Image (cartoon, coloured by chain):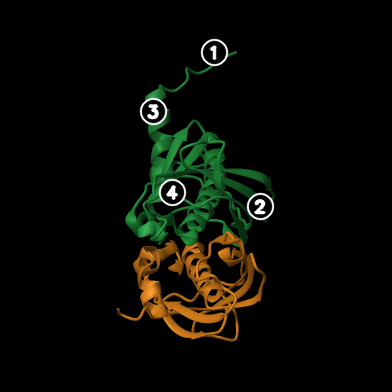
Chain colours: A orange, B green
């Protein structure tokens, strides 16, 4: 059987593939996911700035993945809630990079923080905080 | 006293309003990419996200991607805010919708923050959403959005967000 790498996992998500997301780094409870600038994802035709929904999708995907990369994860998760604060418009033409960290995990819930930047990594484009499900604690007892 | 002018024919009014909505929605590439549509009844808008395989985020269930759902809700909120401003200008005759063009659109509100609650997994079918503007000031607006699929009372997601409104200047008089 072919080993399922985290990038294979990202490619298996149709919406992530539609936005050409690429997995750049993984470690325990943490990942870096990026996507190229795409004129089809522009939200403001006047400035060429990406739509918030596209940045949201990247942060949500990175957050879910960071959850499954945590040692306490059951391997499957779903978003309970995710809040995004938009700090500044992403610079048109630049790649967007999202780093997500699962900083706390209970039997049932994972808590994450995530930050999105463009080529200027000193000033975040958006930050996210959220809660994800962790189904591991809910497995029926044998 | 001069008699009250006859109301415009209904078709003229409908055409004007639909053209304004089309211009607003058609000018945003992301909306076209995601396939979002807007249904209008009077001034009430219902957003539609027609199902597409590319919207899936969990292929095993299958379920809609949380990011697609969030983008749908955020778009619904932004278009509702822009539409309310446009509607007022249009109805009071301050704006001629025939001058609206993708390159010449009213500035859209900017998202400050957006929080989505995922209440149940999004099924692989069409989704609908409506936004309610709870507070709209000169600078800031607060909007709540509800999304459902088969059953209006069984929401699969809801969201609240704050938006920065574009600077409002009186449109130049036509001449």
Residue A133 rendering spot, x and y as whole percentages = 59, 63
Q: Which residue is mark 4?
A: B123
Question: Secondary structure beneath disc 2?
Answer: strand
Residue B35 rendering spot, x and y as whole percentages = 36, 52
Q: Which residue is mark 3?
A: B12
Of label 4 and label 3, which has the lower sequence position? Answer: 3
The answer to whether marks 2 and 1 sit on the same chain is: yes
Q: Which residue is mark 2?
A: B141
Of label 2 and label 1, which has the lower sequence position? Answer: 1
Q: Chain of mark 3?
A: B
CA separation, marks 2 and 4?
31 Å
- Quadrant of the image containing the N terminus of chain B: top right
The residue lying toward the viewer, choosing from B73 and B6, is B73
- Residue B100 appearing in the image: no
How crowded pointer 2 is (Cα within 10 Å; few <14, some 14-19, many 20+) is rated as many
Q: Which residue is mark 1?
A: B3
Describe residue B147's horizontal placement relative to residue B63 as left or right.
Answer: right
Question: Secondary structure beneath disc 3?
Answer: helix
Q: Chain of mark 2?
A: B
Mark 2–mark 1 contact, CB under 8 Å? no
Of label 4 and label 1, which has the lower sequence position? Answer: 1
The residue lying toward the viewer, choosing from B25 and A135, is A135
Residue A77 rendering spot, x and y as whole percentages = 53, 65
Of label 1 and label 3, which has the lower sequence position? Answer: 1
């Amino acid at each position: 059987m072919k080993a399922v790498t985290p990038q294979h996992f990202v490619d298996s998500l149709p919406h992530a593939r539609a936005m050409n997301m690429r997995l750049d780094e993984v470690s325990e409870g943490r990942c870096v996911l990026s996507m190229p600038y795409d004129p089809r994802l522009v939200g403001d035709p006047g400035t060429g700035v990406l739509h918030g929904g596209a940045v949201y999708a990247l942060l949500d995907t990175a957050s879910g993945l960071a959850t499954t990369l945590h040692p306490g994860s059951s391997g499957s998760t779903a978003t309970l809630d995710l809040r995004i604060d938009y700090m500044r418009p992403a610079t048109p033409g630049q790649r967007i990079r999202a780093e997500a960290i699962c900083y706390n995990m209970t039997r049932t819930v994972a808590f994450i923080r995530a930050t999105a930047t463009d080529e200027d990594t000193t000033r975040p484009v958006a930050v996210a905080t959220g809660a994800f499900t962790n189904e591991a604690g809910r497995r029926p007892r044998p | 006293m001069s008699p009250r002018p006859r109301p415009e024919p209904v078709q003229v009014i409908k055409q004007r309003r639909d053209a304004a909505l089309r211009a607003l929605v058609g000018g945003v590439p992301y909306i076209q990419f995601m396939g979002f549509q807007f249904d209008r009844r009077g001034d009430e808008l219902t957003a539609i996200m027609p199902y597409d395989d590319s919207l899936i985020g969990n292929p095993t269930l299958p379920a809609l991607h949380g990011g697609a759902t969030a983008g749908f809700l955020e778009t619904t909120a932004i278009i509702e805010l822009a539409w309310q401003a446009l509607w007022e200008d249009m109805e009071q005759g301050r704006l001629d919708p025939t001058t609206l063009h993708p390159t010449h659109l009213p500035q859209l509100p900017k998202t400050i923050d957006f929080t989505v609650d995922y209440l149940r997994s999004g099924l692989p079918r069409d989704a609908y959403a409506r936004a309610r503007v709870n507070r709209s000031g000169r600078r800031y607006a607060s909007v709540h959005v509800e999304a459902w699929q088969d059953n209006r009372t069984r929401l699969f997601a809801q969201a609240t967000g704050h938006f920065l409104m574009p600077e409002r200047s009186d449109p130049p008089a036509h001449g």
